[in-house]
Image: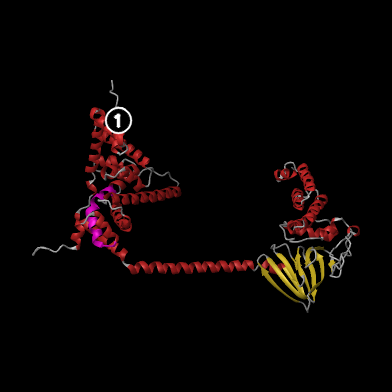
Amino acid sequence: MIPRGARQPSLADNARNSPDPELIRRLANGELDALGALYDRYQAPLRRFIARSSGNSADVDDLLHATFLAAVSSAARYDGRASCRPWLVGIAAQLLRRRRQTFGRLLAMLSILKGTTQTSRDPRPELQARTDVARALAGLSAAKRMTLLMAEVEGMSCSEIASALEVPIGTVWTRLHAARRELRQTLRGADE
Amino acid sequence: MTKLACPRLFEVEALRDGRLLGAERLSFQRHLDSCACCSREVVELQTLADRLCNSGAEADADELHARRERTRLLAAFDAKLAPPERTLVPRGWLVGAAAASLLVLSFFMYFRARSAAAPGTQRAVAVHAEGSASWSRRSEGPVEKILLERGALSIHVDHTGEKRRLLVVLPDGELEDIGTTFTVSAEAGRTTRVSVASGSVVLRIRGQAPLALRAGEIWRPSQPAVVSTCPSCEPPPAAGATSAPIIPPSAAPTSPLSSARVQGVQGAQTALPPSDRRASPAASAEGHEPSPSLDFRAAMALLDSGDNAAAAARFSSFLNAHPRDARCEDAAYLRVIALQRTGDAGSMREAASRYLRQYPNGFRRAEVAALAR
């Protein structure tokens, strides 16, 4: 029973206090407030992950939107784990990977049309980086950068990363090792 | 002097990535307590992870921006749920796609029908009918059919254009054009006369062996079903035979094959090169030279009809008459096959041995060698 004078909890309040599996279940049923609550809960870490993985701040909002809308489509297949953050990160990683492939194909086509050699790396992330860590991270290849962030920042296991990126687990281990080595070398140089 | 790194240093990363399990994990954890090098590596990796976690705040959006984006996301989600726009657009798209497909299909059918109507064929077959002749004409795929009920038709076929079969369906059989110009008559449910002006035709009257008629030859039903230009090779007339040879006025006796040529030609529309098709009538019109194509086709027709003994004989005749023809190897091989089908093992082996002698590197050498054994 609600005590006299106390405010009746709204649907938004209920959503805000619901555990992740409950939110995802309601999302699968098309409940708008569940999506709002999910956004409030995870937009910051997701935005950070997307921004650092892509290295291009211009697309972050669009990719964040696409991630949440893709989560709505996949909500019915959610595996029920307590935190849906790795799941959302996995969706974002897939979108980033597809975007990178599409961008790569477009760049290759333009290079063929123009008759020039394609540059191997997008220089924008390094130019936009403000800290040493961000600069060192931006110096990694997109695949290594994303793998490292998923493992070290998002706390995802190697098998989860392999599943999200659709690569063999051995590739994840290799990328992680190479990324750590390169990052340490860069940071050591910067510290000196 | 540099202190050597611990040989188990690589296991630090393996432990961190969850690659070490069970006993290996326990062993390495025990090792960590005693190895300063590995412990330092653990700390360094953890420091690196902490630096990564603590950075990246520059990507965070301010509250107003986050609220604005939230509203945009919810509006997009709402629009996604709205049913009318979702159903109407695909339906309209489907109708458009169906209409476009129908249009493309109708264009395709139209042009296909146009090409199937074969303007070349319509022009290529010229039919002149007598006043009382009753006939009709229709096209059935690759075959142009002329149905003659009664009367006489003079038909000229131009073979320089499109290659289509021309079949004259007669009351008691059919006539297939191989050459160019001929006249055919029918009365009272019977074919009464076939006259070939140039080229050749194959006449198939029901109940009788097919006949190959060449330029200058005339067929009438009151004579035996053999046309021969060689009196010595002419078989005795069968009792009660209704067809008879017509000796063309211009035809001189040529080869014993001429009599065999007109026997048992069935299914004569085999794969014949256009050059042969055109060359054959011309040669026969000039002096009734033996035609390799016709002979080969006749032999093939016999083989197809199951008359294996006759087919073997025809292939033998072909080999004797046209020893330089490109189809000789085929004929030699098919003679072996025909003899095998007759069950005459001795003759078959003899023919197989002959094939192997003549074509030691022939295409069917392996098969014929097996038969020869």
Residue in front for this viewpoint, B24 or B329 = B24
**Which residues make up the magenta segment?**
A29-51
The N terminus of chain B is located in which quarter? Answer: top left
Q: Main secondary structure of the magenta part?
A: helix
**Residue B334 in view here:** yes
Residue in front for this viewpoint, A97 or B219 = B219
Q: Give yes or no for residue A95 being in the magenta stretch.
A: no
- Residue B265 position, x and y percent, is 78, 60
Q: Amino acid at mark 1?
A: Leu
- Residue B348 position, x and y percent, is 77, 48
Quarter of the image for residue B29 reads top left
- Residue A170 position, x and y percent, is 37, 40
Q: Name the side, left or right, on which A36 lies relative to B335.
A: left
Q: Is residue B359 above or below residue B253?
A: above
Quarter of the image for residue B204 reads bottom right
Residue in front for this viewpoint, A63 or A17 = A17
**Which residue in the structure is indicated by mark 1?**
B9
* Furthest residue in direction bottom, as rendered: B132
Secondary element at image label 1:
loop
Q: Give yes or no for residue A31 being in the magenta stretch.
A: yes
* Furthest residue in direction right, as rendered: B232
**Residue B288 in view here:** no
Q: Is residue B335 above or below residue B87?
A: above
Q: Name the side, left or right, on which B276 lies relative to A88.
A: right
The C terminus of chain B is located in which quarter? Answer: top right
State the residue at coordinates (24%, 45%). B56
State the residue at coordinates (23%, 51%). A44
Q: Name the side, left or right, on which B83 lies relative to B155.
A: left
What is the chain identity of the residue bearing mark 1? B
- Residue A169 position, x and y percent, is 36, 42
